[in-house]
Image (spheres, grey):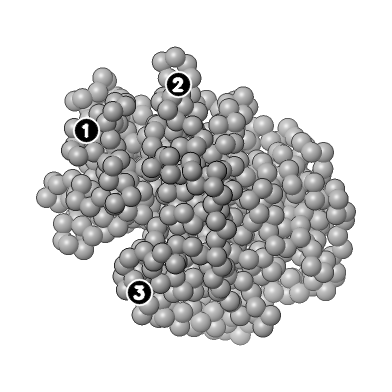
Amino acid sequence: MAGHETHEYDVLVVGAGGAGLRAAIEASTAGVRVGLVCKSLLGKAHTVMAEGGMAAALANVDERDGWKVHFADTMRGGQYLNQWRMAEIHAQEAPARVNELEAWGALFDRTPEGRILQRNFGGHAYPRLAHVGDRTGLEMIRTLQDHGIHQGMAVHMEITITTLLKDGERIAGAFGYDRERGRFRVFKAPAVILATGGLGKAYKITSNSWECTGDGMSLAYHAGAQLKDMEFVQFHPTGMVWPPSVRGILVTEGVRGEGGVLTNSEDKRFMFDNIPELYKDLVADDAEEGWRYVIGDRDARRPPELLTRDHVARMILAEVKAGRGSPHGGAFLDISWIKDRVKGGAEHIKRKLPSMYHQFKQLADLDITETPMEVGPTTHYAMGGVRVDSDSQASSVPGLFAAGECATGLHGANRLGGNSLSDLVVFGKLAGQYAAEYAKSAGPAKVADSEMEAAEAEALAPFGREESGEGPFQLQQALQDMMQEDVGIIRTEAELDKAAEALADLRSRAAKVKVHGNREWNSGWHTALDLEPLLTVSEAVAAAARERKESRGAHTRNDYQEKDSEWGKANLIVEKAGDGSMRVRREEIDPVPERLAKIIEEQG
């Protein structure tokens, strides 16, 4: 055995983004010993890239808003594949979580009357996103971190968890290593909360940071938990497309929420050309009505740029394929046109979108107050993840909980912008609460030496292999290229079959990858160990995408272009079979109860 350092807690939280921090705060408040592990440094979580705002029906800007409207919008956006109970809890609890953040020190933008300001966002009926300019996620992390560090939790930074440890069927803790020195760590805990974020680094073009390698989903899957809705990967319609070094970096939906319009190379607002039947009564007939909606005319209808992300992404891709794209393969997003229509002109844009102004100025030498941005779809968010109970966030494995992007259920086939940040704190709180309750009742769990020995051997394996001629970086790039090409925005059975063959080949090659040097800050070793979660989640996405033979939400099949009413009643479950193979099965959705079905009908 290479030796390891051991820590013991009642609740271990893996991930220090919005969900992980909120879960750790709640568990600490319950009086249990809490350990918080993060892959990067505290405060550097990918949550900071959620820029536009936090969806909550505060009704500060439009008094017609309320939890029922928010619930109906979320269900409609998710194409009714959502776990209805999660959507109900989220809509009801989100306002309290915003107010809680404000009480803890979050500095939201304000209305003239001093209330929290809210902005328009795609798929939301009314201005609903509480925001801090276009840096909302950063303010959320700052607030939760500042509040959380006083709650008594122990924080372990730059730690990668590679394996969940079990005592029979129940969770007993986690095994990992510190990235700086390469030393192994064992965290013993009867309850583990996974809050590790998404899987964007499985794709070539992504807004996600380097940490987003599907760790939590893979850990849960290999521990025996179920995954759900893995075919639904959201491609945000607006990522930077130029220069190549920053391709995929997010351009917040807040740009469109503040009046930004999409045009093609012919200077045409192409979003008016194809309005989904589901939204025809909500979309403006012309540009002027859309602008009146943006500036707060209650009788106006929304501009088509504020339709759901899956639809906007497909529309941009269609313009590019038709030869009407921007010079570097995207579309134009123009906010500069409003400066002659708002008080303050260019300064208004800089004040509302400070991060976007500096991002384009520094990275592309472009002034967004004068020149349109070039944008295109970028892999952004996984609607699928660990299947959890709506009320407790418990997985099917005793003692294992999940919250945030690595969990699933709230968003269905497509997430509405802004629902991610409120998702983090609403369900992070519940995960922390119920994990603490479980830890108190379940008591300590035992970790067998054999489990730790096996975890150490697996982690060290890349050092002891024969020379393969192929390094982990090349293999990761090959995976990303393949996923972008064959399991991207638009899919076909032939491409998904090709992807399945490629993934089998990549897994075989990954088993032969060799790394050199020692264990101290060895980026090759880190990348080699990231290949397992990346391959696992990629296999799950590709397998589920092949099984769902329809187009719905963020899942588009060119060979099955229409929605299928029967598929609209079912989720796909991914689980590990007894022989170690990946199994995908269909499961009927629990019907929406009459009291909530009535709300959906009333909201249109």
Q: Quadrant of the N terminus?
A: bottom right
At a point 76% along the width and 39% down the height, the residue shown is 28
Depth-wise, is mark 3 or mark 2 nearer the camera?
Answer: 3
What amino acid is labelled 1 in the image?
Glu
Earlier in the chain: of badge 2 and badge 1, it is 2
At a point 61% along the width and 85% down the height, the residue shown is 466
- Give me the disc on residue 337: none
Foreground of the two, 280 or 162: 280
What amino acid is labelled 3 in the image?
Thr
The residue that mark 3 highlights is 492
Q: Is residue 171 above or below residue 459?
A: above
Foreground of the two, 315 or 47: 315
At a point 82% along the width and 50% down the height, the residue shown is 439
* Element type where label 1 sits in the image: helix
Q: Is residue 28 above or below residue 82?
A: above
- Give me the disc on residue 110: 2
- Give me the disc on residue 289: 1
Earlier in the chain: of badge 3 and badge 2, it is 2
> Could you say where residue 306 lies in the image, as x and y percent from the top left?
32, 42
Foreground of the two, 496 or 38: 496
Q: Can residue 137 be seen?
A: no
